[in-house]
Amino acid sequence: EPEVTQTPSHQVTQMGQEVILRCVPISNHLYFYWYRQILGQKVEFLVSFYNNEISEKSEIFDDQFSVERPDGSNFTLKIRSTKLEDSAMYFCASSPPDRGTGELFFGEGSRLTVL
Amino acid sequence: AQTVTQSQPEMSVQEAETVTLSCTYDTSESDYYLFWYKQPPSRQMILVIRQEAYKQQNATENRFSVNFQKAAKSFSLKISDSQLGDAAMYFCAYRNAGNMLTFGGGTRLMVKP
């Protein structure tokens, strides 16, 4: 069964460093998302992406964040200058071109630890 | 903006018993989807069950079923014959006509042997 894959599974970085989290969505999906979950808290929406541009973003997704689909298969989330509060689990998700079952398909997450 | 509320931070159930997790949501839309996701310690989000708002019949997936009350904006999850592997965080989620999924705060389910 096709699945969303994310790399790395865990990254440790120093405050102020740039981080890129990578995702490979399911191949025929056209909508892509990043969500964040700080330890012990709810899952929060960051951004959605469609047709090579951001379609929606939350107030969390400030100028330090950017997304890109560099090569037609990968979908990346970049954090330019990480802060301690960026430590979280980051989930990538994708959904098909029609609404279908309405489901978003999630990857296994990338745990980011900022020291 | 849509909000999803899970009023039970933690629930506990005896193995083989039945437990119900509550969820309410706020929306002015008539067309939407509702989901329950399970998050085990591995942290992956696993879809448990989905419900389309236009369907009156409550969704069922094996031991999992929902009680969808559209007028009351309530969407509870019932787990029958609870198993140790059901222990996890459970998130209720709402998806509108767009593509954004909004999650509730989660309910931690503990299953006692």
Image (tube, coloured by chain):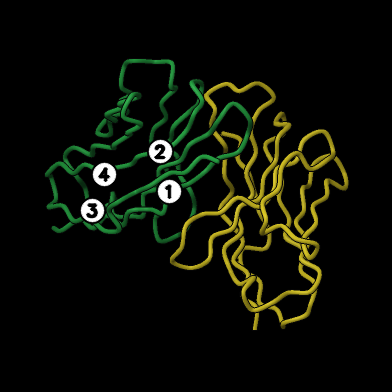
Real-space CA distance between mark 2 and mark 4, rounded to the nearest whole angstrom: 14 Å
Please provide percent x and percent y for residue B75: 33, 34
Callouts 2 and 1 close, C-beta under 8 Å: yes
Q: Nearer the viewer, mark 2 or mark 1?
A: 2
Q: Nearer the viewer, mark 1 or mark 3?
A: 1
Q: Which residue is mark 3?
A: B84
Crowding at label 4, few (<14), some or many (≥20) Cα neighbours within 10 Å?
Answer: many
Q: Label 1, secondary structure: give it.
A: loop
Q: Nearer the viewer, mark 1 or mark 4?
A: 1
Q: Amino acid at mark 2?
A: Tyr
A56 lies left or right of A3: right
Tell me which label, 2 or 3, sits earlier in the chain: 2
Q: Amino acid at mark 1?
A: Gly
Q: In this structure image, what is the colour of chain B?
A: green
Callouts 3 and 4 close, C-beta under 8 Å: no
Toward which corner of the image does residue A56 lie, by quadrant? top right
Please provide percent x and percent y for residue A69: 83, 46
Real-space CA distance between mark 1 and mark 3, rounded to the nearest whole angstrom: 23 Å
